[in-house]
Amino acid sequence: MAPTRHVSTLTLAGAQLAASACEAKAHALGVPMNIAIVDASTHLLHFSRMDGAKLTSISIAIDKAFTAAGHKIGTHLYKDTVWPGGVAFGIGNSNGGRFTTIGGGLPVLGRDGEVLGAVGCSTGTPAQDEEVARAGVDVLERELRRWEPRAKL
């Protein structure tokens, strides 16, 4: 086995593309957002705070992106497992308290299912946050398909 491996990750250009799509969706909804985009290693790559977004939601958006990238699934999927007695009860205390189970964090996945990064949004309801994050993920997925290698015929 090789001692190293190549890890694909979002670039700043990709993060800016996602942020622009998120901002447009937030404007359409009339909900200003904090928008965080992290790379494959869960580190912050880009952040936007729209005018009027809640100051207390800055770290929440970042943590949603961190959680989605680190666990490879949307943060909304934990809703039914984190209550007392649930299989993931107490998980919010992990990772220095950064692990969040509030909807609005979505991973960006490559064609083989690898995590390339994630988008986290916060200020609205969890459903609004997720809708805005989805706009960023969708534009990145479209752009990734444009760059996929094509077979020569």
Image (tube, grey):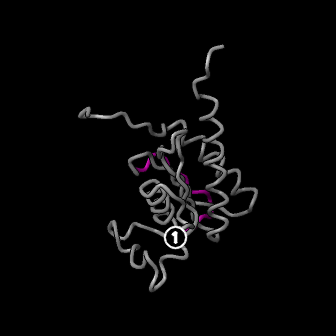
Amino acid type of disc 1?
Answer: Tyr
The residue that mark 1 highlights is 78
Whole-percent x and y of residue 26? 69, 57
Q: Which residues are magenta?
A: 43-54
Q: Secondary structure at mark 1?
A: helix
Q: Nearer the viewer, residue 54 or 75?
A: 75
Residue at 43% across, 74% down: 88
Q: Residue furthest top?
A: 153
Compared to residue 120, the image places residue 46 above or below, namely above
Compared to residue 92, the image places residue 112 above or below, namely above
Q: Nearer the viewer, residue 63 or 75?
A: 75
Among the 4 quarters of the image, the one containing residue 124: bottom right
Whole-percent x and y of residue 14? 55, 38
Whole-percent x and y of residue 117? 48, 47
Q: How many marks?
A: 1
Q: Residue furthest bottom?
A: 84
